[in-house]
């Protein structure tokens, strides 16, 4: 039952953080298409590891280290948004990570396409 609660909290945090990124964050360091891919909340609700994917839009390349720096700058803002929109006694401290799974999948897909052609 406890794990079900954590899954619900993770899902709710994903929605809140995604909406905040899309609607409210205007940090120039956060470029490209940034999306929340996964959130892992610790059992004691003290920490939330938030994984973001970063994709370039068009021909513009995105420096992921700059995006990560920008995401670290807005961690407190995101935590405040989660606190405002949930009824949690303890709002987890947000730890930001880049998730390169999507980029790796695209590279693999491109390699497969090259082999097939």
Image (cartoon, rainbow, N blue to C red):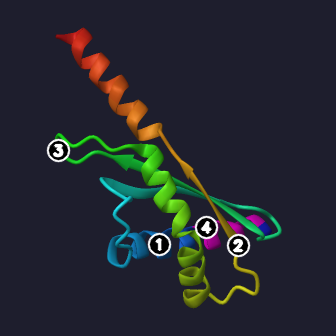
Q: Quadrant of residue 18?
A: bottom left
In the image: residue 4, left or right of residue 30: right
Distance in Å between CA atoms under marks 2 and 3: 35 Å
Residue 1 seen by the camera: no
Region of the chain picked out in magenta, as a range: 3-10
Among numbered discs 4 and 3, the one appearing first in the sequence? 4
Side of 96 relative to 42 (left or right): left
Secondary-structure class at tag 1: helix
Image location of residue 36, percent across then percent down = 47, 59
Within 10 Å of disc 3 (Cα), the crowding (few <14, some 14-19, many 20+) is few
**Mark positioned earlier in the residue sequence (2 or 3):** 3
Q: CA distance from mark 2 to mark 4?
A: 10 Å
Q: Is residue 75 one of those drawn in magenta?
A: no
Q: Residue at x 31, y 17 (%)?
A: 111
Query: Cβ–Cβ below 8 Å for labels 3 and 1?
Result: no
Which residue corresponds to mark 1?
Answer: 15
Q: Nearer the viewer, mark 2 or mark 4?
A: 2
Q: Nearer the viewer, mark 3 or mark 1?
A: 3
86 shown above or below 36: below
């Amino acid at each position: 039952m406890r794990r079900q609660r954590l899954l619900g909290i993770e899902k709710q945090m994903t929605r809140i953080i995604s909406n905040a990124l899309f609607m409210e964050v205007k940090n120039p360091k956060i470029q490209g298409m940034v999306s929340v891919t996964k959130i892992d909340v610790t059992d004691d609700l003290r920490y939330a590891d938030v994984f973001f994917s970063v994709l370039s839009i068009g021909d513009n390349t995105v420096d992921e280290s700059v995006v990560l720096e920008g995401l670290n700058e807005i961690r407190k803002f995101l935590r405040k948004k989660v606190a405002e929109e949930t009824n949690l006694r303890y709002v987890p401290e947000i730890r930001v990570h880049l998730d390169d799974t999507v980029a790796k999948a695209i590279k693999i897909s491109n390699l497969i396409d090259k082999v097939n052609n």
